[in-house]
Amino acid sequence: MTERLTQQIAKIIARAVEVALFAALGLLVVMLFTAAARAQGEQQPPPPPPPPTPVSSSSSSPTPQPTASVPGPFQPTPPEKISKQRKGFQLSGRVDGSTSENGQILAVTTTTGYNFTHWFGLDVSVPFFFTRTSGELSRLNPSGITGDGVGGVSMDARFTFDNPVLAWSSTMTGIAPSGDPNKGQGTGDWTYLWTNNLAHEFGRVEPYVEAGVGNTVLGTTYLKRPFVISGYAGNFEGGLNIGIWKSLTGNAALYDVLPWGPQTLFSRYVRKAGARPDSRNPRDYLLVTTVIGGPDLVRDNGYNLGLNLSPNKVLDFSFGFSHSVRLKLDTFSWGVGFNVSNMFTRSRPH
């Protein structure tokens, strides 16, 4: 009786969170369009230049004219010069790879979108996964085989507010059930996530915090999870971005995953039919395809270390290391991103 009541309470809480997330999405969209319309209405054309000061005939030399103040290298950047999203269509791609004792995962993702304003945009991303199981895992578990295929197609709404005081970004993501759960490329159901990021620059150092909530937990640039998660959880990350040299930056961060309610894992490495219910060991994903349990199945914490290099506005490279305390798993990762849209744009002189 107690177990059934607990399950009913968990379902009610999950439904309340789901309704709250969708309500927040609707409210966010309304606020975005209202802010965009207000900002556009407040914009006014610049005043005409003042007429030249006449030179007095009694003066032996012309009156000196004031010179415009040019921002120097050590002067604060005015608010209107802060980097914003470029309006219009966007097209980009990314190749991410990771390796661990379990095997290798390669993800090729194509993203297209449209930025309606400098602060608001929509994206659609299509990932394709290539998975290879390690030789030791294949020997211990013959059902651990390779698996390739399309992952969950994701759609997100982005809001970015970047200013000298505090940079804030908010993203609502929905993922379609297009990935095969038997290959660990999806959950077989719609999933969604709401993520917020706050950051502030202090010279070369930029501390940031990020928090997300939804019915799944996604990987990061440096962390490629060996399974797909279906279940409600909050995920948190805090760290530093450090400018090292020119376009080379470093990253160090701690992360934490706090789940609640029923949880299900879909292994990326094992193709064994059936499910393991009532599990509390997250490493059971190495034994069967589907693992079912409670919050302890997904709870995790660890740290990420990484380097990013952006030699130009089209290419960027990343190299990282991640350690999961709960899974006792070390993962090395790399990535190459390319922005096709920037190949056809020219920087405007200020």
Image: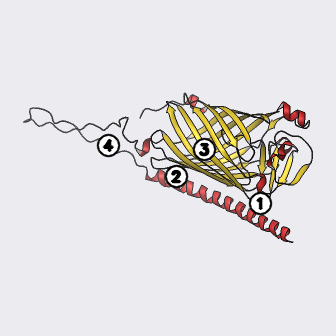
Whether residue 136 is visible to the viewer of this picture, yes or no, is: yes
User: Label 1 belongs to which residue?
Assistant: 261
Q: Depth-wise, is mark 2 or mark 1 nearer the camera?
A: 1
Q: Between disc 1 and disc 4, whose residue precedes?
A: 4
The structure residue drawn at horizontal position 56% and vertical position 54%, both measured from the top left corner, is: 33
In the figure, is residue 267 to the left or right of 44?
Answer: right
User: Label 3 belongs to which residue?
Assistant: 253
User: Label 2 belongs to which residue?
Assistant: 36
Whether residue 86 is visible to the viewer of this picture, yes or no, is: no
Q: Are marks 3 and 2 in contact (CB under 8 Å)?
A: no
- State the residue in front, 197 or 281: 281
Amino acid found under the numbered disc labelled 1: Gly
Q: Secondary structure at mark 2?
A: helix
Q: Secondary structure at mark 3?
A: strand
- State the residue in front, 243 or 316: 243
As measured in the structure, the alpha-carbon distance from the residue carrying label 4 to the one carrying label 2 is: 26 Å
User: Label 4 belongs to which residue?
Assistant: 48
Q: Secondary structure at mark 1?
A: loop
Q: Secondary structure at mark 4?
A: loop
- Local packing at callout 3 (Cα closer than 10 Å; few below 14, some 14-19, many 20+) is some
Q: Between disc 3 and disc 1, whose residue precedes?
A: 3
Q: Are marks 1 and 4 in contact (CB under 8 Å)?
A: no
Amino acid found under the numbered disc labelled 3: Ala
Q: Are marks 3 and 4 in contact (CB under 8 Å)?
A: no
Judging from the image, the colouring scheme is secondary structure
The structure residue drawn at horizontal position 80% and vertical position 43%, both measured from the top left corner, is: 179
Residue 266 in percent (x, y) is at: 82, 46
In the figure, is residue 30 to the left or right of 109?
Answer: left
As measured in the structure, the alpha-carbon distance from the residue carrying label 3 to the one carrying label 4 is: 50 Å
